[in-house]
Image (cartoon, coloured by chain):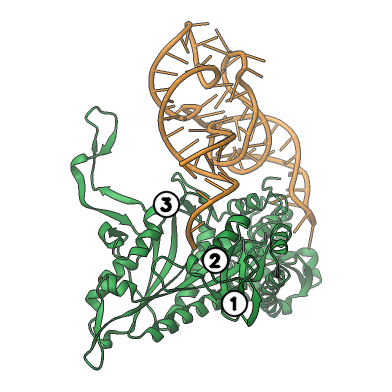
Chain colours: A green, B orange
Amino acid sequence: MAKEITGMSEDYSQWYIDIVKKAGLADNSAVRGCMVIKPYGFAIWENMRDQLDRMFKETGHVNAYFPLFIPKSFLSREAAHVDGFAKECAVVTHHRLMNAPDGSGIIVDPDAKLEEELIVRPTSETIIWHTYKDWINSYRDLPLLINQWANVVRWEMRTRLFLRTAEFLWQEGHTAHATREEAITEARLMQKVYAQFAEEYMAMPVIQGYKTPNERFAGAEDTLTIEALMQDGKALQAGTSHFLGQNFAKAFDVKFLDEQNKESYVWATSWGVSTRLVGGLIMTHSDDDGLVLPPKLAPTKVVIVPIPKPAPEINDVAEKIMRALRSKGISVIYDTDDKKRPGFKFAEHELKGIPVRIGIGKRDLENNQVEIARRDTKEKTMQTLDNVEQYVQELLADIQQNLFNRALQYRTEHTTKVDNFADFQDVLDSKGGFIEAHWDGTTETELKIKELTKATIRCIPNDAVEEPGKCVFSGKDSSRRVLFARAY
RNA sequence: CGGGGCGUAGCGCAGCCCGGUAGCGCACCUGGUUUGGGACCAGGGGGUCCCAGGUUCAAAUCCUGGUGCCCCGACCA
């Protein structure tokens, strides 16, 4: 009726857009490529953010905030870095508006041109490393473990709600270390934190690995990644953690004195995840009825629907259940709207992905029971009133686990070992997903494969087993399989 | 940056070809009947038809120019 969602199999892209809009997560805005994150979508992001923030702090990081604007000259200090971002920067050139002399409206005041243009940050390495120069003198100042929650702007050609927007919210960790080993350990730790978050909270299984030189972050010596697989068989880079070597320390002249009074450049990492994760969450679990949310991130875990509408005896029971669940930290709402009928509400709450629905009708109360429905499988059971609290707790845990299992099973079924290029193309076009194949290690081959198939090397998995083989494209020697996929 | 589409009520759209009182569905308000998987009836409110200029007695509709957003691709988190 009112909220038709395009079928996933019919048009995956349209299905995704329908979910985002109809579940009330976000809308397009008046600004090209920028979205309005609506309260429900923002609530999901807040839950992600809060949990990640806890995990960052548990691993010793603190939050700070750096400017939105970056002097143009900063960006050019690290050569690879500027190459990577130059083409997608928003630039501030003036600082004042004025009424047009001809009365045609407001124009930029030509006299208010900035001496040096400001770049709206696409990422903050440069402004942060400029600042670190002042903060770091001695080994005693290290490690410096800082995270920032911020918005950044990348003027992308092609945008998609949550997955790629011109402005997005994210966190960026920027750490400084005394030794190479310590920085590498940090980058690995944060990759692990991201993987743990993705799997335990988002119920989204990820492959941990590292990027090929070609896919590396601009300015990094090594880029670690977590890669997830979406339901249409495309991969999503869900988070990255970079070992930056001494590149930024050298570019911004950040040195420290060690215990031996010897001066050296510090070692750096940076790592980030963004609102893109919301897109990943949607594309991992949702279905043709709408959003499906893992309980650990659902803004509302339980909704109670009075059947057919609120009534004193139903309200009493609902209140009791709410109190009991809330005392266990379970967010629950009672849908008291007396204008909408139960069927409408069921559909609406399913669209919003609320993990558990409790239906209370007079008929049920006569039998001292309520109906409990789970969003993931849409199964319903009757539970006696004294059992509701415990049942719901277990059910939420079960849903969380089931979503992960389901996604893992999908990924397993869509991960294929391939040993020749014909199969490689066949698999990509038929079922998609991850392809484990040998690669000769050259960028040339990587690019050629991309050109021919649109598949990229998502990563070299951390746990890739050493096995001799022949490159799926060039036939040259290879010592391990890498992970290919078409990606978002 | 190429290709396509769209701008008309809060949302989704028709009307435009062939100029003549701005319409439909949903949502909203009122009343009533309903209510265990997206209710129905009756009444009602709500519009710079993206902007500017032109043609015309008359423009949502025709002409010219502009602008915005979306979708699909190449580039990227």
> Secondary structure under badge 3?
loop
Badge 2 or badge 1: first in the primary sequence: 1
How far across and how far down the image is residue A32, in percent?
Answer: 45, 46
Q: Please tell me whether mark 1 sits on a helix, a strand or a loop.
A: helix
Q: Are marks 3 and 2 on the same chain?
A: yes
Q: How many marks?
A: 3
The N terminus of chain A sits in image quarter = top right
User: How far apart, in angstroms, are the residues tagged by discs 3 and 1?
Assistant: 33 Å
Name the image quarter holding residue A385: bottom right
Which residue is farthest bottom? A260
- Label 3 Cα crowd, 10 Å radius (few <14 / some 14-19 / many 20+): many
The disc label shown at residue A237, or none = 2
Residue A351, x across and y down, in percent? 66, 57
* A202 over A341 or under it: above or below: below
Identify the subunit bearing mark 1: A
Picture disc at residue A200: 1
Question: Residue A390 sits in which quadrant?
Answer: bottom right
Report the Cα–Cα distance between label 3 and label 2. Answer: 19 Å
Give neighbour class at mark 1: few <14, some 14-19, many 20+ (Cα, 10 Å): some
Q: Earlier in the sequence, mark 3 or mark 1?
A: 3
Residue at 66% of width from left, 50% of height from top? A339
